Image (spheres, rainbow, N blue to C red):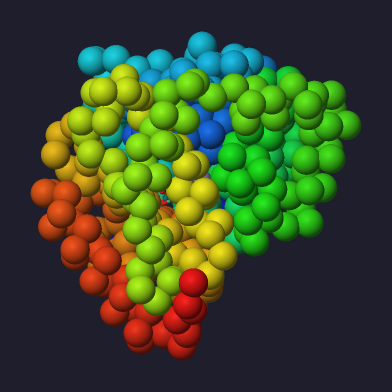
Amino acid sequence: MSDSHHHHDNASFDQIGEVLRAHSSFVILSHIRPDGDAIGSQLALGHALLAAGKKVRLINEDGLPDNLMFMAGSEKIELPPSTPLEVEVAIALDTATKPRLGEKSLHAASKAKIWLNIDHHISNPRYGDLNRIDPTSPATGQIIYQLITALNLPLPPETRDAIYVAVSTDTGSFQYPSTTAQTYTMAADLINRGLDVGTINSNIYDNYPYRRVELMRALLNTLEVSDNGLVAHWTMIDQLRVDLNLRPEDSEGLIDFIRAIRGVQLAVFFEELPDGKIRVSMRSKDRRLDVCQIASTFGGGGHPLAAGIRMSGPLDEAKTLVLAEIHRRIQASEIESNHL
Ligand code: AMP
Ligand code: MN
Ligand code: MN
C-alpha cells in the first residue's frame, strides 16, 4: 500500500530505535552519484551504530567521491559487493526512490528482511517497512541527528562531522529557506561537541580541483537566459567530461551560480551522461514554481526548490521538452516576467 500523502505514516524514533536495538547487522545505503547529504548521512548513522557495537556495512553504487575523501571514517564507504550481504536490516538514506539506490546496491542488500527508509524528499513513495520522511528537514543529515540524539546513541567525531557536512552541503552553507532555527541549534551543538568549523568548511568549499573551474568556464559559454528573464540554463555535453577528465562530483553545486542571477527564478543544468541519458538539475527561487512537480512530469523528483530528472536523450530533445514544460508552468503561475 502506498500512502505517500499521509504524514502520520511516519515511524517514530522509538520504533526505529526498536529495530536498531533488536538487530545486530546492518547495511546502510544512499543514492547513486552521492552528494554530501547522502555520504554524510551514511557515515553519521554508520559510525553511531559501529560505536554502539553493531556490525555495519556502508555501500554506495558509485562509491566515495574524491571531494568527500577528507571526511573522517569515509574509508568505510564501499562499492557494492557482487554477492548479497548477510545482514538483517537495510537502511536507505536520502534516496527519493528505491531504484535510485542502484541495481548492484539493491542486489547487495537483497537478503535484508527489514527495510528502513529515512529521507527528506517530499516525492518519496515510502518504499520501506518503516519510513521516516520529513520534507520539512533541510537534509537527511538533520533527521539522523534528531534520531541519534533522541535515542541517546553514541555520537563519535566521525558522526558529528558527517552530520555537519550533510546539512551544510544540502542547505547551500545554511542559506536556503529550508534552513531552520533547529538547523542552527544543531550546528551549535556540533561545535560544542568539538567540531572545527574553519577546517571542515575549508575542506568542503576551498579545495576544488582546477578542472572544476575549467568546467565552469565551458558551461558559461553555453549559458542562455529566456526572453522573459526568468529562466537561466546551461549545458554540458559528454565530450566535456572526456576533454577535462571530469568526475561526476565536479559539476555538483555549480548551478547555484546561475540561480544567483538577479531576476532569474529558475535555473536548469542539462548534463549529457556517458550512457546517453540526460541528467536535468533544476533550482527555483519561488515557491510558486515547484521544480519537484515539473521533474515528476518526466519521472524525476526532489524538493519544491531543488529537483532532478534522469531522462532519455538526445540532449536537444530533452532540453526542448523540459524548457517547454517550464514555460508552460510559468504561464500558468502568477509570476511576472522581468526585463534584464
Ligand atoms: P540535484 O539537482 O541532482 O542536486 O538534485 C536535486 C534534488 O533532487 C536532490 O535532493 C536529489 O536527490 C533529487 N533528485 C535528483 N534527481 C532525481 C531523480 N531522477 N529522481 C528523484 N529525485 C531526484
Ligand atoms: Mn542527496
Ligand atoms: Mn538530501
Q: Quadrant of residue 1?
A: bottom left
Estimate the x, y position of residue 39 in percent, counting from the top left: 51, 29
Left or right placement of residue 260 versus residue 155 in this view: left
State the count of labels.
0
Q: Residue at x 49, y 66 (%)?
A: 264
Left or right placement of residue 43 versus residue 190 in this view: left
Q: In this orientation, which residue lies closer to the viewer: 105 or 237?
A: 237
Estimate the x, y position of residue 45 in percent, counting from the top left: 59, 30
Q: Residue at x 50, y 57 (%)?
A: 259
Can residue 178 be seen by looking at this rendering? yes
Estimate the x, y position of residue 324 in percent, counting from the top left: 24, 71
Q: Residue at x 36, y 24 (%)?
A: 247
Q: Quadrant of residue 277?
A: top left
Q: Which residue of the protein is positioned furthest toward the top in this rendering?
A: 75
Q: Is residue 209 above or below residue 216?
A: above
Q: Is residue 249 above or below residue 333?
A: above
Q: In this orientation, which residue lies closer to the viewer: 51 or 144?
A: 144
Q: Which residue of the protein is positioned furthest toward the right in this rendering?
A: 192
Q: In this orientation, which residue lies closer to the viewer: 83 or 264?
A: 264
Q: Residue at x 44, y 71 (%)?
A: 230
Estimate the x, y position of residue 240 in percent, counting from the top left: 26, 31
Can residue 116 be seen by looking at this rendering? no
Q: In this orientation, which residue lies closer to the viewer: 281 or 206?
A: 206
